[in-house]
Image: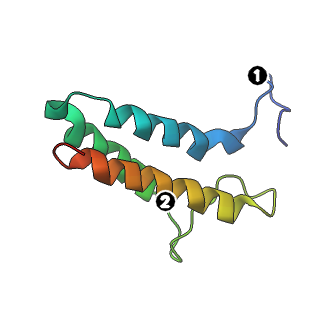
Amino acid sequence: FPHEAWYATAPYYYYFGHYYASRNVLALKEDIRAEYSNKLAEFVVAGQYDDGSFWDYPLYGYTKPYGTGYGAMILSNLKRAAVTNP
């Protein structure tokens, strides 16, 4: 259940956090940007379902659209980061 653990937070911030990580990758120096973009993209894509969706937290009904929206934004940022001078 959300917010029930000793740290009183929920696991459904997973893709939210990765979205902001992808924004930080865009801000890296150009010579290391592609490396970190590829590493984060591999990690995020590993959580993608066969139908192309991403699920952030399956307890609620909005997670598939929410997770997929964040997944698409993350991968879009990382694709831009992997290109020289995005």
Residue shown at the point (50%, 72%) measured from the top left: 52
Mark 2: which amino acid? Ala
Label 1 CA crowd tier, 10 Å (few <14, some 14–19, many 20+): few
Residue at label 2? 72
Task: Please state if 1 lies on the left or on the right of 30 as rendered.
Answer: right
Q: Secondary structure at mark 1?
A: loop
Residue 76, quarter of picture: bottom left
Instruction: Identify the image quadrant of the N terminus.
Output: top right
Residue shown at the point (19%, 42%) measured from the top left: 85
Task: Please state if 69 lies on the left or on the right of 62 as rendered.
Answer: left
Task: Please state if 3 lies on the left or on the right of 15 as rendered.
Answer: right
**Residue 47 visible to an observer of this rendering:** no
> Which label sits in the foreground, 1 or 2?
2
Q: How is the image coloured?
A: rainbow
Q: Residue furthest toward the bottom?
A: 51
Q: Is residue 48 above or below residue 7?
A: below
Q: Nearer the viewer, residue 84 or 31?
A: 84
Q: Is residue 58 above or below residue 52?
A: above
Residue 36, quarter of picture: top left
Task: Give coordinates of residue 68: x percent, y percent.
Answer: 58, 62
Task: Give coordinates of residue 19: x percent, y percent.
Answer: 51, 43
Mark 1: which amino acid? Tyr
Residue shown at the point (48%, 59%) measured from the top left: 72
Dot 1 and dot 2 residues touching (CB under 8 Å): no
Return the disc, 1 or 2, that comes first in the chain's sequence: 1
Residue shown at the point (67%, 64%) measured from the top left: 64
Q: CA distance from mark 1 to mark 2?
A: 29 Å
Q: Nearer the viewer, residue 42 or 74?
A: 74
Task: Give coordinates of residue 73: x percent, y percent.
Answer: 48, 54
Residue at label 1? 7
Task: Give coordinates of residue 26: x percent, y percent.
Answer: 33, 37
Q: Is residue 84 above or below residue 53?
A: above
